[in-house]
Image (spheres, grey):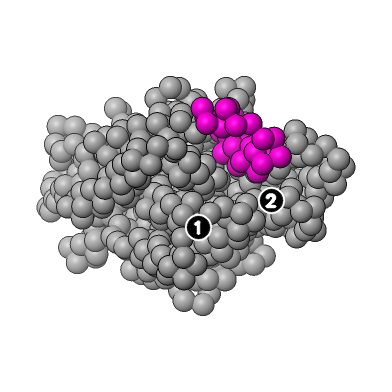
Amino acid sequence: MNRKIGIILTAILCAMYIAARFWRLTESCLWFDEIFSVHASTHSWNSILAFVAQDLIHPPLFYLLLKLWTGIGGEDLYWLRLLPVIFSIAALVPFLLLMRELKQERFVTLLALFLIAFNGSLIKYAQEVRMYSLLMCISLFSIWLFSRYFIKGKGLLPLIIINIIMVYSHYFGWFVVVSEVAAIAIFQRIKIRAILIMFGSTLLAFLPWAVVVIGYARAGAEVGQNIGWMQKPMPANIVQLILSLVEPFYFATSNAVPYSIYKVSLPTLLIVATALILFCVKWNRNKTSSASEPLWMLIIFAAMPVLIAFIASWLMPYSIWGTRHLIVIFVPLAIILAISLCEVEQNKLRISLLSLVVLFTGYAFFLTTQREITEYSWCIWEPDIVTARETGPGKIYVFEDLVGYHFWYAAKLHGMADRGPIKAVNIDGLTEDKAYFLPRGFDDVQTINVAEINDEWLFIAYRAKEADPTKQPLKTFLDRGYRIKYQRADDAVAEKAILVYLEK
């Protein structure tokens, strides 16, 4: 390919990559985990580390960066979402440097860039106010620097520094570090001492944070509360991960929506699987160990984190399996797929497979443009706060930590912290989603026994299939002599967001 044409096409794909991450950036409101991120960032510099450490399951770097970010531009939704987008865009730099280091042909680079530009999971996590796009970006810097060390024996110190940053971004960053140690142990044992120094230096730098987190765990913070709801990886979970690795544009944002657009993802999976099989046959036929080492390195980066997460999830009391955590494997796998597609020997078959990948990606984009905006119940609770302010006096009672945390954040934004929310408990027949719980060390949402409630006016907010006065929690209040003065039930995905104004 002509160098000038290659540069132009790379620039066009980079622009499309960026545009995909800005598209519909503020379509949905902040959800529970994003609110936690913003909440953490509002703490003082003296208290933010303690607040994050009590959560146990994430290191602090993203929250510290978000604190700096909100200090500059506040808590506007677009501004908040812009930070993870910037990290996702920054990931283009190590990606292109990695492809140059691996000496891949221009067309392979373009195809790999195409695959990651429109991957639904990568777009979704580029727009979420969480640490996942930061993890992807830093892990790519790590893989690039490691490839330099692997191929040229240069740059151990920068690799150590970036790996320290990576493990302070997310604990799954350690799986990338372990992959680097494994690659050296398998292919270049002469460098094993140096790579163990890298591992030891990263571990030493991480120990202060580990000590703080262990201290909170011993003080009673139970990690099961954080991840006890996560499923151990079964065949269905593995299939879901595989589909997410190849699915263009679409990502399931809730269990209430289809996990995949199967008429796109399954044919796409069949296409790349065909290319992979043909490539493996060709590779096995033309074995050249020195030339294959960089490719094996990519395979280790794509496979090792999955293997570790799978084994750990079955051996430990709680599962750690999750697509968002495994974001570190998406780019290495995309490069492998791009190499496989470009190495198909039969010219007509190669062109056909590449054309089908592009056509199905275009079809996925068309389907995405036709998709209606998904309204989740938590996106209705902020307008409900405004409705409560306009309807009348009275505190707001909720019955789940999920609802309570969203109402608390909405109340804070609209200057209604004195109105609640208050969590009412001990209502027969009510259960709540254990995947959500109020942050440790946070007591702005008071918990009260429903029997203690005797307000003259009050609001109750909850989610249910319908606003039925014969069902909980509304039934309890009607049985206690309250009358419905105002009621609204807004349709959301698989449920309704219900706000009821009661008087006694």
Please tell me whether mark 2 or mark 1 is closer to you in this view.
1
Q: Could you tell me the amino acid type at mark 1?
A: Arg
Counting from the top left corner in percent of width and height, residue 274 is at 40, 31
The boundaries of the magenta stretch are 280-307
**Is residue 167 one of those drawn in magenta?**
no
Q: Residues within 10 Å of mark 2 (few under 14, many from 20)?
A: many
Would you say the residues marked 2 and 1 are in contact, meaning their CB atoms lie under 8 Å apart? no
Please state the horizontal and vertical placement of residue 186, each as a whole percent of the image: 75, 33
Q: Relative to 35, is 160 on the left or the right?
A: right
Earlier in the chain: of badge 2 and badge 1, it is 1
Which mark, by number, is residue 237? none
Residue farthest along the bottom direction in this orientation: 72
Q: Which residue is mark 1?
A: 106
- Nearer to us in this view, 73 or 16: 16
Residue 444 rendering spot, x and y as whole percentages: 47, 55
- Which residue occupies 42% across, 35% down? 275
Name the residue located 50 percent from the left edge and 44 percent from the top edge: 339
Q: Secondary structure at mark 1?
A: helix
User: CA gap, disc 2 to disc 1?
Assistant: 18 Å
Q: Which residue is mark 2?
A: 147
Determine whether 243 is above or below 94 in the image: above
Res. 436 visible in picture: no
Which residue is located at x 49 percent, y 67 percent? 3
Mark 2 element type = helix
Q: Is residue 298 magenta-colored? A: yes
The residue type indicated by label 2 comes to: Ser
Query: Would residue 30 be visible to someone looking at this image?
Result: yes
The answer to which quarter of the image holds residue 26 is bottom left
Residue 272 left/right relative to 280: left
Q: Main secondary structure of the magenta part?
A: helix
